[in-house]
Image (cartoon, helix red, strand yellow):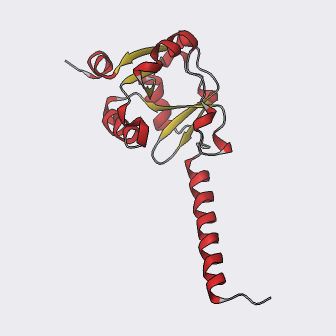
Amino acid sequence: MLMTQENLIALSYSLIIICLITYMTITHAPRFSIDAETSKLIAEYGLIHFTFSRNASNIIENGLIPDDSKKMSFLEKNMVWFFPADSASFSKNLAEVRSKGARKDVDTIVLFKKEFIPMNKLKMRKNPKAIIHIGKVDPNYIEVMDIPTYIEKYLKTS
């Protein structure tokens, strides 16, 4: 069976799309160990998770539970996503989260307290830098607050 030029072009486009999807899936998945710089930030400031105020009472009661319905691939099963809680990257990380469709209205911070973070349950995605915790985060290890309260309490220096 001979391929027509149109079939070859369609096959080429299909292969390119499959390669792009595979590349995006693999690069989005956090599979890297925490580097020394990030480890230092986590130890000093903790981690933050952005969410909505409508989720706050459930998080306070049950902790942060991975939502596998929103994962981009099978590589992201049983993960809770965080960013380092340092003030230098806060605005950039909030903007990154808010750039993603329905998350544009996040208004609440979950602070994963630095003294409770199990470094052996963390992995990192390189770009943009995001940290994942594998499994549920105990409600006793977190603090939930709206974004202005977080900024006032943790990011104001005066």
Q: Is residue 143 above or below residue 126?
A: above
Q: Position of residue 149 (x, y in %)?
A: 30, 16
Q: Is residue 141 above or below residue 52?
A: above
- Using residue 116 as the reference point, say whether residue 108 is left or right of it: left
Q: Is residue 23 above or below residue 151?
A: below
- Using residue 148 as the reference point, say whether residue 28 is left or right of it: right
Q: Quadrant of the N terminus?
A: bottom right
Q: Quadrant of the C terminus?
A: top left
Q: Position of residue 64 (x, y in %)?
A: 55, 21
> What's the residue at 59%, 58% (across, down)?
21
Number of numbered labels in the structure image: 0
> What's the residue at 42%, 23% (across, down)?
44
> What's the residue at 55%, 16% (across, down)?
116
> What's the residue at 72%, 87% (across, down)?
3
- Using residue 29 as the reference point, say whether residue 36 is left or right of it: left
Q: Position of residue 111 (x, y in %)?
A: 44, 20
Seen from the viewer's position, the closer of residues 115 and 99 is 99
* The quarter of the displayed image where residue 118 is located: top right
Q: Is residue 158 above or below residue 29?
A: above
Q: Position of residue 92 (x, y in %)?
A: 33, 40
